[in-house]
Amino acid sequence: MKPFQKRSRLEIIRDILKVIRESNNSISPTKLQRFSNLSFQMFEEYVNDLEKKGLIEAKPYREKRKIYSLTDKGRAFLDKYQDFVNFLADFGL
């Protein structure tokens, strides 16, 4: 990605899911927001949407806290996304 180029919706979703996967499938909301490089409002919108679609899930952690993890559907999305990126690269697109 070029400097200062806006990410597409799919790229943001990929980034969020990738951060969770690279954190051993367990990450706090604060770290996830920071590593996915989103404002609080945008982060809330994306995370809520991904939860509704069944790509991630929030699990309780130490009383009032929670952590996010990928679902099987979220893992499958990342795999298919990478397949698609590779497909485009094969055709020079």
Image (cartoon, rainbow, N blue to C red):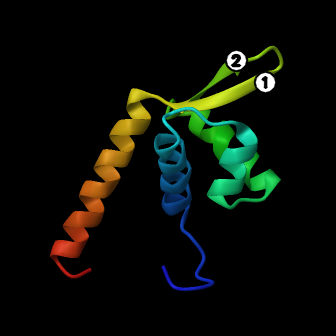
Q: Residues within 10 Å of mark 2 (few under 14, many from 20)?
A: few
Tell me residue 37's x, y (percent): 68, 61
Look at the picture and state if 54 lies above or below 43. above
Residue under the point 71% across and 19% down: 61
Q: Are marks 1 and 2 in contact (CB under 8 Å)?
A: yes
Specify the quadrant of the image occupied by residue 72. Answer: top left
Which amino acid type is shown beneath numbered disc 2? Answer: Pro
**88 left or right, relative to 25:** left
**51 left or right, relative to 87:** right
The answer to whether one can see residue 45 in this image is no
Mark 2: which secondary structure?
strand
Q: Quadrant of the C terminus?
A: bottom left
Look at the picture and state if 1 lies above or below 33. below
**41 left or right, relative to 52:** right
**79 left or right, relative to 39:** left
Tell me residue 79's x, y (percent): 30, 46
Tell me residue 15's x, y (percent): 52, 56
Look at the picture and state if 5 lies above or below 22. below
Give the residue pinned by disc 2: 60
In depth, the one of 2 and 10 nearer the eye is 2
Which amino acid type is shown beneath numbered disc 1? Answer: Arg
Specify the quadrant of the image occupied by residue 82. Answer: bottom left
Residue under the point 48% across and 54% down: 14
Look at the picture and state if 40 lies above or below 23. below
Give the residue pinned by disc 1: 65
